[in-house]
Amino acid sequence: MNFKKSISLAALPALMVACNASVDVESKATMIDYPKTERDTTVVDEYFGTQVADPYRWLEDDLSAETEEWVTAQNKTTFGYLESIPYRDAINKRLTELWNYEKYSAPIEHGDYSYFSKNDGLQNQSVMFQQKGEEEPTVFLDPNTFSEDGTTSLAGIRFTKDGKLAAYQISEGGSDWRKVIIIDTETKEQVEDTLMDVKFSGISWKGREGFYYSSYDKPDEGSQLSGLTQYHKLFFHKLGTPQSTDELIFGGEGTKRRYIGGYVTEDQSYLVISAATSTSGNELYIQDIRKDHSPIITVVGNFDNEHGVLHTIGSTIFIKTNLNAPNGKVVTTDFSKLETDNWVDFIPETENVLSAGTAGGKFFATYMVDATNKVFQISQEGEMEHEIELPGIGTAGGFGGRWDDESLYYSFASYVYPSTTFKYNIKSGESVLYKKSGVQFNPENFESKQVFYTSKDGTKVPMIVTHKKGIILDGSNPTMLYGYGGFNVSLTPRFSTANIVLLENGGIYAVANLRGGGEYGEEWHDAGTKMNKQNVFDDFIAAAEYLIENKYTASDKLAIAGGSNGGLLVGATMLQRPELMKVAFPAVGVLDMLRYNKFTAGAGWAYDYGTAEESKEMFNYLLGYSPVHNLTAGTHYPATMVTTGDHDDRVVPAHSFKFAAALQNAHEGINPVLIRIETNAGHGAGKPTDKIIQERADVWSFMFWNMGYKALPVDNEASKS
């Protein structure tokens, strides 16, 4: 059945662009001269007998001269507007002050050395240090030297078990395509040629012989963003041999396994392989690598649930799974009888979602309780020994390490508790402060509380609301509502330096834990996928209505924000209820729901979204909310600043380009509808500090200005005390 047919794609004329950057910002509110975007009305696709126009298809060609000209023109308009906001520089200065403190990672030990990362404050990338005993630490890797503009970042590092060698990944311009460099940890010299074109991969060493890594075949020359990545492959790279001779271990043509990962167990006995067609559910395989040519054994041969090997002790395998346990559990089995019928519960499922780690001969069970964490130490016999006493209600991470460790380091944070590192003695169960955050923020002046509100269908949804103590709930507070709602991702409390600017100016930051996320397990996730996706938008709308009804804010003082899948959330919500908010920030969003699966890794998102090709019913559902396809001419949309990166090869910028073009064409009214395109930037990871600060300054400036503030609500100089 030919369910989709592309009818035509005409050649495109050069763009004619115009903008006026000389007028003041108050005038611009009514006379922004948006760049002219060519509409090619001949591009039409057919789905199950329905024709769908795609007049901005040409913007999908991110390397064309026409698209480059369009990007330049849009940025000229956007930055001309932003530069005219009178307090933009003051916000940038304040953020720079707030960011300028030393930041440390927890140390990790490998061989004779310990390693930690440090940022002096405003360095674009954190520097990795190496330290031997009590000697002075020395620079091990400085990503600030990887490129002149600071846009090449350290994207992961793995050491051999003896600590003699390390393989690290670098990302250039925020791309998901990585290079791998192997160095001698003693001399810091590169060992062999750089591995190229590695994507969505960990690195796992097999002794010092070599390591496992994953990648796809690199798309053909042309647009670096438009090649589909369908068949992931697991390779073994033997040290001293060219990458071209690397052994294919698993994957390739046949089943479209889009995500394959391989890792060696701590005891170096087994290779564990996880394979998935989408972002939910995976097959599980295991191989005894102590013997040459031993077979890869299937543990779970379907994609219905999620599984991973947590640890091994001899032939006993500990598996974290959600098979018959939507909230997760840990089971044990023997290598000789890996079938699921032989699994025995070790940490049983509870009413709360489980994540697990191991260190120091113990297991650590981290439970999510209404989107916050509780952590318990478990013995090798599966007995709960005690709960780890955390500083408060928030997010704890880092409960993992080597089986013979005596201590571990964990972090704790909340919306009003800056991220702090603690050292935990595994034997005594005692925690001591290791590194306190140096950020200029006094938690005593702020409060964060959880509320539960009712969504459209009666579902209770949690939301955490953070603000200064003593604010008056009279509906006048500038408020940002943030959400995600997808891919089993849980939004647990995190501290944000950027958010201090909002909070100290009397603003409110609210985070809603929408369906589609993982806060309440797989059932909560599934309730926001495919034909249930509208639940996510309804949850977000209900969160906004709750904030307004309870006088936290009002529609003309409310902004909504989200990134990636959250960018879809914002796009759909602002189209369905444009009067509900004053400002919208769809960031790096999935905004064309009929074609998202045509680009890079997009086909792997089908578990959450479905695709337009799979059925007429699914096509109609996607068409019903796809932001690119649901803009209505003559509508007064909220002030909108779409943000994306020109090198984003995960959610390609074409989504944002097409949405911004369609929005500017349909919108009517004085609210600005702009797109801010970061050049030489990707989906977000590894972005240099200076780019982060400027982007956040632009977000707060745009928000406050369009909420009607001619000056900032609070004098920042006074707020510092």
Image (spheres, helix red, strand yellow):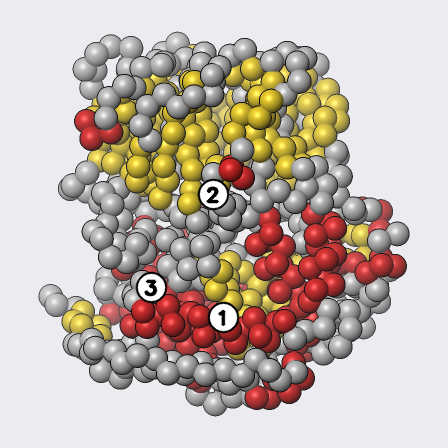
Residue at the image point whose x is 30% and y is 79% from the top:
14
Residue on which disc 3 sits: 62
Query: At which x and y percent is residue 658?
Result: 38, 72
Identity, as a three-letter code, of the amino acid under mark 3: Asp
- The quarter of the picture where the N terminus appears is bottom left
Residue on which disc 1 sits: 75
Query: At which x and y percent is residue 686?
Result: 50, 45
Q: Give the mark nearer the N terminus: 2 vs 1.
A: 1
Identity, as a three-letter code, of the amino acid under mark 2: Ser
Residue on which disc 2 sits: 147
Identity, as a three-letter code, of the amino acid under mark 1: Asn
Q: Give the mark nearer the N terminus: 1 vs 3.
A: 3
Using the rendered image of the protein, determine whether residue 245 is visible from the camera's viewpoint. Answer: yes
- Measure the C-alpha gap from mark 3 to mark 2: 23 Å
Q: Judge the density around disc 1: few (<14), some (14-19), many (≥20) Cα neighbours within 10 Å.
A: some
Using the rendered image of the protein, determine whether residue 351 is visible from the camera's viewpoint. Answer: no
